[in-house]
Each structure stands twice: as structure tokens, then as C-alpha cells.
Image: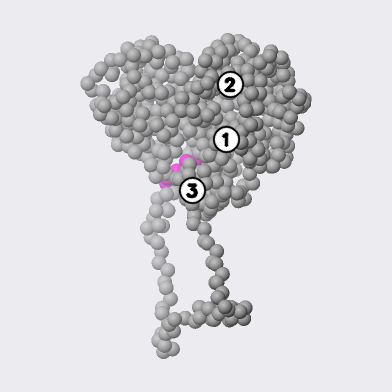
Amino acid sequence: MTDLTFIIPIGPAHEHLAQRALDSVAAQTVKCDVAALVDTERQGPGVLRNRMLREIQTEFVSFLDADDWIEPTFAAETLAEYRRIGGDHYIFTDWYDNRGEIVQTPCLNGPDGYPLSVPDRKPYCNGTWHVLTTLIPTAWAQAVGGFDENLPGFEDTDFYLRLCATQRCGHHLARPLFHYAANGGRALAFLQHPDHERIKIAVMQRYGGRMGCCGDAQVAALPVGQKQDGDVLAMALWRGNRSEVGRVTRRMYPRISFPRTAWVDPRDVTQSPMLWKVVEQPQPVAAPVSRGLNLAQIAQASLATVKRAAVPDYAPPKDEPPPPPVQARPNVSRVMRLGQKLDEPIFIFPVKDYPSYSDIKRLVQLAGFDSATKIDAFSRRPLIVVSPESLPALDGIKARVIAWQLEYAGDYTHNYDGFTGEVWASDKAWAEAHGAKYVLMGSHADLGGTLNIDPAYDVTMLGYMVARRQAIKEQLASLRWPVDYPRPEDRDYMLRLTRLMLHVHQHDNAPFVAPQRLALAAAYHMPVVSETTPGIGDLTDYIEQADYDGIPALVTTVLKRKTLTASGDKLHQYLCVERTFRTCVMEALNHES
């Protein structure tokens, strides 16, 4: 298993240089993964980096531009330094410019683009910069939302300032391990951008009005709840108090719920119409236009208006009895619904919006369950925690708390060490080995759609393409494959046009179920071929299995069967009709082991 993935966006002008960057990753003295995309649609490096970042599963990530390259020991030395200092800072290094000279602390304000020394652990201070390529814990990069895709420049500066603002600081490794081919050319080109100063000021305003040092108390995100220029008043459309992070600006909004309002950047509203609705603001009443009236007349007219408004249009006769008082009636149906809800769980999701959790969140919503981001210690309803993060300590918590293991089990087992609540797992073998309760992850018909009559693709894995998966794909290169990582807006269309879902284990000797992928396949009526999985549980009769070396032959055979569509329908019937997500959850809650 590798520890580090290099993300390389390849612009159209750098395709002829990208092989050098790829070769430098392949030449690392420790094994590393690489994710690379060509920007055919000219969306910009920030968009491509974010798209790849969402799929990274290694512990660390490094961003490398296609026209730069690294020394063979970059990965080994930065990883060693990270562990030596205790793992609380990302690592940046010295580098070589395009003349082969070592650069330690280039500064855009210094002579010839160089100078000032930058103190360790404070990479952004007194106008100094380090380059984009560093060693960063993947969770950190994902936690701050990656790069601002709306900036035409400065997106790397903004990214590291956001890390600084959240107390994720850098550490300087004084070794030249990186080659910066442009020698500041990209940065200098942005200096000539017509909106350079405006963009710089906007970025500075995000972090307290200046470019500060890492860990500096004055470096802060936009004040939560305060109106900014251009904001619109928007109503929260979710229930259950929680704060929200803007999908575009990554700005933190206050802890509210429906129907309360907040000042929101209109870009965040447009990007998330399911979260926000713009509220029409009352327009100020214009003062009446006086035509020939003096001040006394205007005052008298206003007084008359007030007096008229205070007189009721109708007064009942004195002998008419007053209307009887309105008797409040209990809302029986509401009381019944509240009572029924006490049996239903609340799903607890992490505050961070993990893209890989979109299907689980959708299933929770389709099943009619409530969700939240924090545990209510005294909740009368069961709380089901679904998270790749470390599980909470339950000291002082009276509620029934359940942790549902829906991840790739072998990678996340340590998260359950010391957890004192209940544990569910959708891998039967893992559940038996760890004393957890086996719970099948059902699905829902509305999670997907029907397979197209004339599909364009034969097979997809829809998973992170590690080497062992890539090797299988290469053996099946004659088949029609969609892109490995479709854009969110393209995924539904791609799945509707694909005939077969293939599941290959991510690691050697880690034969665990991928329950989310199976639930998704069922929703799209897609048959599944899986590498042999001892913990497949209730799905034994619904999924074809083979050992790793036998997967290509089995896929080829299954695709030729006339019963292919029927196999997908059979899985759909089982998980979307007979054993739905809601059915599985409620049965597991009511039948404690």
C-alpha cells in the first residue's frame, strides 16, 4: 500500500512536458501513486486538482504541475521529515529554478524574484512564498475544500492561506527536492492580469485583511454570520440546526435551520439550491413626493393617515355577544407522527462533505430518515454514526449510539478501537471477526435509473484505480469503459449506459465488501461481478464472484449471457424492493443481537 499520491493537472500547452513529471514520480525511491488529468475543456488547474483530490485515498497528497518535476527522493525525505517532527505540519522544501540554481525563499517583492528568508513553520510571512508542491495529509487538503475554482490565479496561495487559517501550518525542509521549470513565470504572468490587484485584495479579505503568518491569530476566515459585499438574504432549507460551508466559496455560514435566514454569497446559493432559497427583501417605502405642500401640510397629512389607519372599518353593535374563545385542538396526527419517529434513527454524518458519502446521504433521505452532524447526548432516538473519521467517545452520552462500518473495512478497523457503543458492519466476515452486528445495506429504486436499451459501455468499476484494478482493466481493454472518475453531473448518465458493475478489491489480502457500490449497482439494475469476498453475506446468490486471476474470464462470460439484464433485475428486486435500505435499518434496530 502506498502512502502518497501525486496529483498532476495537465494543461493543453503542457502535454509535451507532462511525461517528465510523470517519470519523476515513477522514479521515486518509495512507491507512489499518481492521478493525472488532461484539461481538454480548459477548466483550469484548480478544477482538475479538486476533481482528483475527491478520489484520493492515500494518507498523503502532493500537487505537481505538469511542467515541473521532483527529485527521486522527494517522497522518501518529506515523509521521513513529516514523521520526525511529529506529524503536525505539512512539509515544503527548497528547489531548483530553471537555471539549476537552488532557491530557498523566493519572494515576489525581492530582487530578481528571490530573497527573504522565511522562518520554519511560517511559510507565508512578510510577503514570502513557497511553491505549490509540498507533502500534505490528504485529510487536511480535503478538509479545507481544495482549491477555489473561481480564482483565475492565486488559487494556490489561497489554498495554503486557508490551511494557515485553520492552524494547519507548514515546516521547511532545507533540501532542494523540486524543479520549478517556469522560474516564477506563471506568477509573474498573473501579476500582469488586469484584475490582479482586485483578486489579491479579495483573497486578503478572506484572511483578516492581510497575508499573515501561519498560526497568527489575525489570520481568520470570513466572520461567520456577517454580511459581505454582494451577499443575498437566503433561507436555510434543511431541518436540524447545523452550520454549512459554501460549496463555491468554502465560507462558513452560521448554525441555523429552516426557516431561518442568513447572508449568503449568491454563488453558494446557485451551486446548492437544495440548501438555500433567496428571500425577497422588503423594499424601503419611498417618501411621498410633495407638490406645493409646505412642511406643516405634509406633517398634517401624515397624521391624518395614521389616525385613519387606527379606526376599525367595522364595530359590532354593543348588544351583540362577543365571539366565543377559540378552543385549541390537539393535533392528533402530529402527536402520532412524533411518537412513531421515536423508533426511527437519526443518522450522524461528518461535518465535512465527503463526496464518497453522497449515495449514503441520498439513501438516508429517500428512506425518510433524519440526519444531523452532532450527537445529542440525551436523544431518545437511536443515533447511527456513519463516518470515516475517528468515532466519538461516549462518556456521559445517554443516547443509543451505533457506528455503522460502511467503509472499505480493512483500512478503517482502527477507528473502532475503544469505541464503547454498538457496531454494525455490512461485511459479514468482518462483523464476525470483530464482534459487530451484520447488517445488509439495502438500496432504493430512486437512487438510480433503468439501464439504457442501447448501452454505450460494457463495464465500470467506479472506484479508485489502484495498480491491481488497473491491471484488470488493461486485461479487459477490448471492452468499452467509461471514464474512471465521471463528473458528478455526468455520473447518472454514465451509469445508465453501462452494462456491468465490476468490484475488484483495493488491496491485496483485503477481501472486503464495498456495500455502497453494490447498493448503487442494484439501483441501476446492473449485474455485479466481484473478486471473491468471504463476507458477501446475504448477496451470495445475487453476485458473480471469481478469484483475482479469474476475473477477466468471468466478466467476458457474463457479458455474453442472454440473462445479463435479468441478473441486474434480480439484484434490483432484492435490494430495492424486498430488502430496502429502510427495511434493513429498521429490522436491525428492532432485533438487537
**Which residue is tagged 1?**
151
Query: Residue at (58%, 18%) from the top-left corner?
Result: 67
**Which residue is tagged 3?**
276
Query: Residue at (42%, 49%) from the top-left corner?
Result: 341
Instruction: Indicate whether 220 appears above or below 73.
Output: below
Q: CA distance from mark 2 to mark 3?
A: 36 Å
Query: Residue at (53%, 39%) from the top-left corner?
Result: 248
Closer to the N terminus: mark 2 or mark 3?
A: 2
Viewer-side residue, 190 vs 100: 190
Q: Nearer the viewer, mark 3 or mark 1?
A: 1
Viewer-side residue, 257 vs 217: 217
Instruction: Indicate whether 163 appears above or below 86.
Output: below
Magenta-drawn segment: 343-348
Assign a secondary structure to mark 2. loop
Left or right of 102 in this view: 461 = left
Question: In the image, is residue 280 part of the stretch drawn in magenta?
Answer: no
